[in-house]
Amino acid sequence: MKNTLPATEQINPRSQGLDRKTPAGLARVFNAEDFNAARAVKSAHKEIAAVIVMAAQAYAHGKKIIFIGAGTSGRLGILEAVECVPTFGTKPSQIIGLIAGGKKAVFRSQEGAEDNATHGAQEIAQHAHPDDLVIGLAASGNTPYVQGALQKARQLGAHTALISCNAHAQTKYAQVHIYLPTGPEALTGSTRMKAGTATKMALNAITTGAMALCGKTYGNLMVDVRPTNQKLVARAIRLICTVAQTDEKTARNLLTRSGQNVKTAIVMHKRACSRTHAQQILKKANGFLAEALK
């Protein structure tokens, strides 16, 4: 009989006998399978690039980027959204994550919630608007909660994408399908493993790529970082020292005078201008530091 199960639900012949392996043997087999996550992401680079453009366009026009999923996939979407705030200085309301079962599902599994397509649609109806980008996250590609969300998103005029590990995923409501062929998990059906790893890698590429296209980086430097703790303050000072080619004392003073904004501080120093003038220069350059420094 033909196997109709998604690859993520099939038995992996390379990891059989986990209960009889040594700790070292377990570590080796898990690591060997993890390499497939990176290969899967590499195979989907064209689709990932397409979603990077979609995300950049949404962000640049003040629209939302919404990640929505259930279980591990939902938690990964929330993690991605949350991390954009300190990394790129984004507004918490512009890049958001939604999970089946609501906030309590972040900390405690609410497995039955993923079967509710109506709930997914209701979540999107509450949060999405025309030209927003809704990215569905589902290892199987067929999670009802996610499919309901994508269907409602299209009805609202939002753009859609789906990240899955199933070649036969339901893609009717997704404009782009990022298919990550991770194959069977080392622990059968446990998509928190390779599938989750590959999904996180794809999300990293989408958000970082989109933010680079929107002027949130200078070269490969995190110049829109929010210095909200000691580590990030130190990073901000190093960035100012590196780009503005100045000493630490001057950089620290610039960071204070700029209102804790790295790009503003750099422009103030390089253009020998006030905070207000530096902000005007950056605004004219659409936030691109390289353009502002010309």
Image: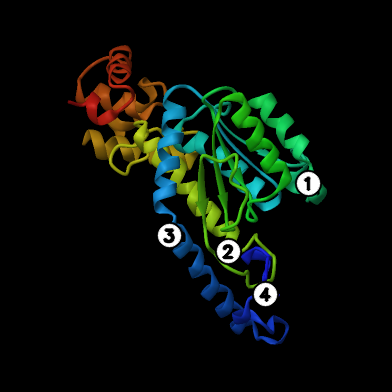
Which label's residue is closer to the chain start, 3 or 4? 4
Q: Residue at 66% of width from left, 46% of height from top?
A: 74
Q: Relative to residue 203, is residue 136 drawn left or right? A: right
- What residue is disc 3 on? 43
Q: Give the alpha-carbon distance from disc 2 to disc 4, as whole Å.
A: 14 Å
> Which secondary structure lies at badge 2?
helix
Q: Give the alpha-carbon distance from disc 2 to disc 3, as whole Å.
A: 15 Å
- What residue is disc 1 on? 115
x then y, percent, for residue 97: 62, 37
The quadrant where residue 267 appears: top left
Closest to the camera, between mark 2 and mark 4, is 4
Marks 1 and 3 in Cβ contact (< 8 Å) = no
Which label's residue is closer to the chain start, 2 or 3? 3
Closest to the camera, between mark 2 and mark 3, is 3
Which label's residue is closer to the chain start, 1 or 4? 4
Q: Residue at 46% of width from left, 38% of height from top?
A: 87
> Which secondary structure lies at badge 4?
loop
Q: Give the alpha-carbon distance from disc 1 to disc 4, as whole Å.
A: 24 Å
> Which secondary structure lies at badge 3?
helix
- What residue is disc 2 on? 194
**Which one is in front, 138 or 27?**
138
Which label's residue is closer to the chain start, 1 or 2? 1
Q: Relative to residue 152, is residue 87 drawn left or right? A: left
Rendered position, 3 above or below 51? below
- What residue is disc 4 on? 11
Circle 1 packing at 10 Å, graded few (<14), some (14-19), many (20+), is: some
